[in-house]
Image (spheres, rainbow, N blue to C red):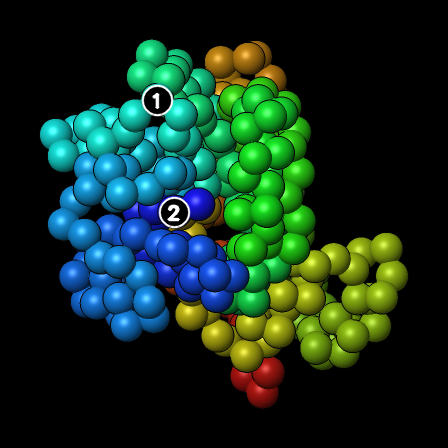
Amino acid sequence: MKVGFVGLGIMGKPMAKNILKAGYELVVYTLEKEVIEEMIGEGAIGVENSREVAEQSDVVITMLPNSPQVETVLFSPGGLAEGLTEGKAVIDMSSINPVASKEFAAKLSVQGVEFLDAPVSGGEPKAIDGTISVMVGGKQEVFDKYYDLMMTMAGSVVRVGEVGAGNTTKLANQVIVALNIAAVSEAMILAKKADVDPELVYEAIRGGLAGSTVMDAKVPMMIEGNYEPGFRIGLHIKDLQNALDTSHEINAALPLTASVMEIMQALKADGLDVKDHSAIVKYYEKINNTTVIKGDK
């Protein structure tokens, strides 16, 4: 099986490298030529556009920022659709609006091309380790065919329903992560304002019911004042916007999601949208005139 990969950003590049490590032949394209050169050095085949990726591959993986970018890569001149033929497949691992996933799948089905929406969770560290979680929407037989390929990048790959279900699941995931980071931020600020060391509070509660993967990943970053992006606030804003858009379409009320969205928009206004979403704590630091950074008063 020859695999194509389009979109070699923070997540896509390490994911593609893990496919190579598993022994698959890989054809790559991204807008950054230096990244293509890096991947060629790793053993991939670099090409000039998305169409050539599709022409040379049996299945193509896309890992892109949002629905408009996926649509452009698929259907613009020189896009994947021009090189896709009957029997091939697209696995879109981008986090996008589930309505868009269904639209893309319908258009590709006219060409006899299968489609899976398979967004991921775990951030850059798990992309590097090959332990991301993948939530997949699509036909069972297509999922089964490409399960082993997806597992080269993942710790778990779960089919959650038909096309669109993958991105709906990812939106649920992103709501939980955003609200969790905000809750942890509030708790650490509470500790600091009460003159209790946030680091000790974290160590005391992390093994109990309040403990979580989010807490373990983000509180140490907050205490260190390290906001280098594993997952940027700007991308999380995109995900929450997709969640809110979807909720409006299906008449679901998400008041806490809307509140955290406003916090993230305030951070974006302060120029922090390029920082890791652990920087949500900086909103609370600002309105409380304090910091949870270790050693700071």
On residue 70, which mark appears? none
Residue, x 86% and y 55% (percent of image)? 209
Q: Nearer the viewer, residue 20 or 168?
A: 20
- Across and down, in percent, residue 31 comes to 19, 52
- Look at the numbered disc 2 and give the secondary structure of its residue: strand
Q: Is residue 47 above or below residue 292?
A: above
Q: Residues within 10 Å of mark 1 (few under 14, many from 20)?
A: few
Circle 1 — which element?
loop
> Residue under circle 1?
86
Residue 44, image x, y percentages: 31, 61
Q: Nearer the viewer, residue 279 or 162?
A: 162
Q: Is residue 230 above or below residue 154?
A: below
On the rendered image, what quadrant is the N terminus found in?
A: top left
Q: Is residue 88 left or right of residue 128?
A: left
Q: Quadrant of the C terminus?
A: bottom right
Q: Is residue 255 visible?
A: no
Give the residue type at disc 1.
Glu
Tell me where residue 94 appears, x and y as whole percent.
42, 40
On residue 2, the disc is 2
Can residue 37 be seen at all in this image of the molecule?
yes
Q: Quadrant of residue 45?
A: bottom left
Residue at 50 percent of width and 76 percent of height: 225
Along the horizontal axis of the image, is 270 left or right of 292? left
Residue 154 position within the rendered picture, expressed as x and y whole percent measured from the top left: 59, 54
Asked whether the residues under the numbered discs 1 and 2 touch, taking CB atoms below 8 Å apart as contact, a structural biologist would say no
As drawn, is 207 to the left or to the right of 55?
right
